[in-house]
Image (cartoon, grey):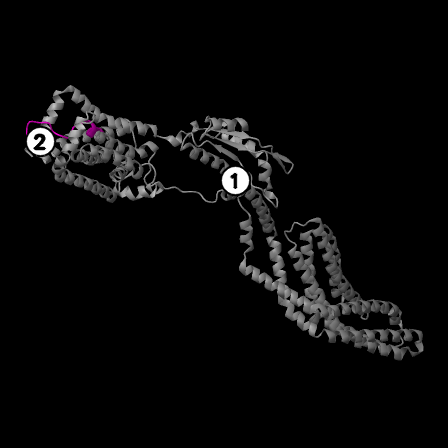
Amino acid sequence: MKQILEIFGEDIQSIYKNWVVSIIILFLMLLPSAYAWINIIASWDPYGETKGILVGVANNDKGAVFKDQEVNIGNDIIQELKGNQKLGWQFTTEDEAISKVKKGKFYASIVIPENFSEHILTVINDNPTHAKIDYYVNEKINAIAPKITNTGANSIVDSVSKSIIKTASSTILTIFNELGIELNQDLPSIENMKKMVFKLEKILPELEQSMETIDEKIEKAEGILEVVDNGFESLETLTNQREQLSSEVKLYIESFQKTIENIDPIIRENLTTVQAESVLFTDWVNGLSNQDLTETEANQVREKGNERLKRQADLAGSLQGLLVKMNAFSNKNLLDDEIAALNTLLSQTDSQQLALKSLNQEQLLNLSHSNKNIATNLLNNYSEVTSPKLNRIMEDAEQVLGDVNSLAALESVPDIKASMKSTNETLGKRLNELSELQKRYPEVKSKITILADKIREFDKMYNLNEISEFLRNDIERESDFFSEPVLLNQHSLFPIPNYGSAMSPFYTTLALWVGGTMLIALVNVDVVSDKKYYAYQIYLGRGLLFLVIGLMQALVVSVGNIVFLHIYAVEKLWYILFAMLISFVFITIVYTFVSVFGNIGKGLSILIMVLQISGSGGTFPVQVAPVFFQKINPLLPFTYAINLLRESVGGMIWSNVLMNILALLGYVAAALCIGLILKKPFFKATEKVRMKFNRSRIFH
């Protein structure tokens, strides 16, 4: 140990006493830092200064016509690029743009063809054509510039594509929005229609029961009509043959009584029909609420409503006329209330027709409810009120039999006959309609049932309110979404603000190896002394000098990176300490090579440095390098040295730090073993080679 320190002490004295040597040693300490600093500064922010990369832009687009408007998308691109500072856009002609690319004055050029807008607008046709932008690039000027300009060209294409998608989606969403608004306005009418269908479905069993007995009722009604006709024939004979008046009047009265008995169910049936018509009309009017109708739709509504009102008026009018004539057989006016109710219903039906012309829905609804109430009351009171009145009229008619000499009643026979004839005709018409309804009832029932089932099935699967809400949208926000449906949410786990800081581990590592190579090139690894030292003493004693100079190199370059260049480093102290550890490892390796192998070791150090520049993954990921470099990557000291410095720059994970430190210390152990074990035998074996080098007067 004493001899080792003695050698180191003599080296320090020699440096101290010789100012030339001192300057050279100082130079060796500083020069590697200059190498690192120059490279770090040069690559500080290359991708942030791309506005100096000149790219020519020529617009030949002639535009196109879309919906009677001139469209020139090429001009829009030019205006957008004028506000884009990412590249040095130069706006010129096509010939000049291509010419300057060939001459190397522009790195690339972009030419927008004449048919650019025309081709883009074919997106609305059956056979769309891709619009193209011509891109010219000079790849011999620089290896990286074409990649940057290519990114700029692609950004233009992406921008135009996003704009087209946004415009198209905005148009579609506008249509959806209008449909949603219309559907929302029609929801009340749709709900009313559904209620009407379900209500019709609910009363189908009752209608079916009525249809089962309609044949019997029609046959009975036809018999009644025949009886009435026969009765009037008898009355005419009675009028012409007064001498037989007594017997004929008696027969007529009996016939009339029989007519009243038989016509009772017909009146009840007609009242039921009037009430049903008024209920259906009221529901139909409810279904018109809150609808905005076109003129065509309004005319259809008027026509349909008039048909319903006419049926109701005809039936109510026939009943009213019949009750008036029946009331005439009694001087007590027993049917005045029923006749007045029917007159009110007829009057309000006329008012409904007037309201229907102007589509006054509020007035229609009020009148419909009133008519429905009138018809319902007439029907509900028929059994207890109206039917007993008819029986009393029959009783009054029987009193006529007690006074056959009085012919006053005969004076009204012609009028009664005319009225009854009109009533018979109306009843005959209604009987035909009932017969037709009976024939079509199965078809009507089937359609109503199918429609109700379809509505229920639709309600189970869909919600009209949700559909309406879905169709209504924020057009601007959702068209933006379609133009860019996926956004990249970047999470930088170990953010580094600039490229220079990110590259400092590589350039610092390289500078430290270069510094070690300079040392072995300028400083002798052998000890020239009158004293005799063992090989291991020379190896370790001179090695201490190399180590001190190497540590100073690391201290200068790492501190300079932080203090002068202001590189970003999360752990600045560890950055400095790791740099000194790396220098210790590198100096040990290169010093051992030269100490053991002589000048061959110098060449070996340079060869390993060259391999490490390409195979360490310091600039590009090693995975993109050829397979050979991927295989040697785990064997290279640079790999672990660069990774160790990166930990201190971006943020340390101690498991990674310890793994890299252990790997580097492994190289130190291997180098020391080689130096301590092989120096003496290799020194003797290569003595003749060293002598020949020295005699050449070229190498030392």
User: x, y percentage for residue 531?
Assistant: 5, 29
Q: Residues within 10 Å of mark 2 (few under 14, many from 20)?
A: some
Q: On the image, numbered disc 2 is attached to which residue? A: 5
Query: Left of 272 or right of it: where is 600?
Result: left
- Nearer the observer, 268 or 412: 268
Quarter the N terminus occupies: top left
Quarter the C terminus occupies: top left
User: x, y percentage for residue 436?
Assistant: 74, 68
The reply to whether dot 2 and dot 1 touch (C-beta < 8 Å) is no
Furthest-bottom residue in this view: 247
Is residue 527 on the magenta stretch? yes
User: x, y percentage for residue 314?
Assistant: 77, 63
Above or below — where is 359 with respect to 379?
Answer: above
Query: Left of 223 or right of it: where is 371?
Result: left
- Stretch of the chain drawn in magenta: 518-533
Secondary element under disc 1, as helix, strand or loop, is: helix
Is residue 147 on the magenta stretch? no
For the question of whether residue 344 can be seen, the reply is no
Q: Residues within 10 Å of mark 1 (few under 14, many from 20)?
A: some
Identify residue type, mark 2: Leu
- Nearer the observer, 114 or 205: 114
Above or below — where is 12 with respect to 286?
Answer: above
Q: On the image, numbered disc 1 is attached to which residue? A: 161
Above or below — where is 219 with respect to 38?
Answer: below
Dot in front, 2 or 1: 2
Q: Residue 266 lies in what quarter of the image?
A: bottom right
**Residue at horizontal 13%, vertical 35%?**
683
**Residue at horizontal 56%, vertical 39%?**
131
Q: CA distance from mark 2 to mark 1?
A: 74 Å
